[in-house]
Amino acid sequence: MIARKEYNIGLFSCRFFDRFWRVVRSSLSMKTIHKIFFQDARDLKEIASESVDLIVTSPPYPMIAMWDDMFGSQNLEIQNALARGDGRQAYELMHNLLNPVWDELFRILKDGRFACINIGDATRKVKNDFCLYPNHAKILNYLIDIGFSALPDILWRKQTNAPNKFMGSGMLPAGAYVTLEHEYILIVRKGSKREFKTESEKKNRRESALFWEERNIWYSDVWTDIKGAKQSLSNAMSRWRSAAFPFDLAYRLINMYSVKGDVILDPFLGTGTTITAAMTSRRNSIGVEIDKSFQQTICPIARHIVDFSNDYLHDRLKRHFEFVKNRIQSSLPLKYTNRHYGCPVVTSQEQFISLDGLKAVQGRGDNIFEVIYSAKPLFLKYMVE
Ligand SMILES: C[S@@+](CC[C@H](N)C(=O)[O-])C[C@H]1O[C@@H](n2cnc3c(N)ncnc32)[C@H](O)[C@@H]1O
């Protein structure tokens, strides 16, 4: 449990966290709570040590031109390095700005919990030097140095319609280089394996399980089926800089690496994708974003999350029913029955999966949202379709 004395914070935050932890502590609660801080994630003193169950995030990518101004505004030396054509120095300095965030994440993550970091490498010509800036390797090495254990990562193969599949010297060897069409999702763990000891922890874990057919795709090390983000942002500045990741990506990671009632953190929140995926997954969440202009995007989305989430969960169930239909047609085994939906499933571990439909979302003060879920598992009305 979080010791109150660890909160080195003001009155407002104390009151907020009292409420936050009250909801979080009762894992059977049909409510979750979500809080956004508009501030720099390099100092997260508002968040107690060992209080977060999962981190899902994507930082600004060093050496990708769209982030030059943001990095440059935080350290003038970066602007100077780029101006004099010293790409390697700029790359180092940009990572030096991200490193304090990784330190904070290590502090606030509980033992046995995961961090999932989406990052792309950059290719860039600075002066006459064209090369790859391997952001994923740089970040992973740093995470290992500060104490995280690396686990197999996920290669996210982005679907692109780019007409120029290769660059450099065209058809002529040996100067062409391959097109960069993938990003990484680094997966790291703090400490030893998470344990589920009490009967209620085990029950909650069973209810948080995935369907067999989902597991086979989600736990693959190459993801090819997730398309880029579709977000309609309210302001052109935010649109330019958001580089949002897709909802599916955040939803999947949250459901793979946490259980219902957990606390999810995104220290580079952007348009709020991680928070909305946490709401849809019955997890609590905290988002941190340095650029306050994103408030105009995140808060309206959060307020209108109920229909979006319920449709998304409905589609997830529908995909399972479709899978069951095909499996029956192919005379393949479906030995078990899910207790909540009465539908066939492949393994005994899927018998207790229940998806929680959302009933309402309520604002609870500045940038705080409470989501209320239906007491019954999702959507019996859809089962008769
Ligand atoms: C790649 S975007 C994240 C996009 C997000 N995953 C989404 O789905 O919208 C990185 C975000 O980090 C924010 N950011 C950059 N430096 C930050 C810092 N030191 N603290 C908090 N946020 C920061 C940027 O403003 C930007 O919104």
Image (cartoon, grey):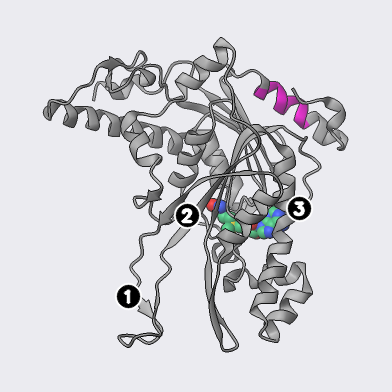
Q: Is residue 81 above or below residue 20?
A: below
The residue beneath circle 3 is 42
Q: Residue at x 54, y 26 (%)?
A: 260
Real-space CA distance between mark 2 and mark 1, rounded to the nearest whole angstrom: 24 Å
Q: Count residues near mark 3 (Cα–Cα under 10 Å), then give few for <14, some for 14-19, many for 20+.
A: some
State which tag comes first along the sequence, 1 or 3: 3
Q: Quadrant of residue 164?
A: bottom left
Q: Quadrant of residue 17?
A: top right
Residue range in magenta is 16-24
Between tags 2 and 1, which lies in front?
1
Q: Which of the pair 134/2 is nearer the observer? A: 134
The spot of residue 258 in percent (x, y) is 54, 31
The residue beneath circle 2 is 231
Quadrant of ligand 1: it is bottom right
Q: Is residue 82 on the magenta stretch?
A: no
Real-space CA distance between mark 2 and mark 3, rounded to the nearest whole angstrom: 27 Å
Q: Which of the pair 296/159 is nearer the observer? A: 159
Label annotation for residue 163: 1
Q: In the image, is the residue at mark 3 within 8 Å of ligand 1 by its beta carbon? A: yes
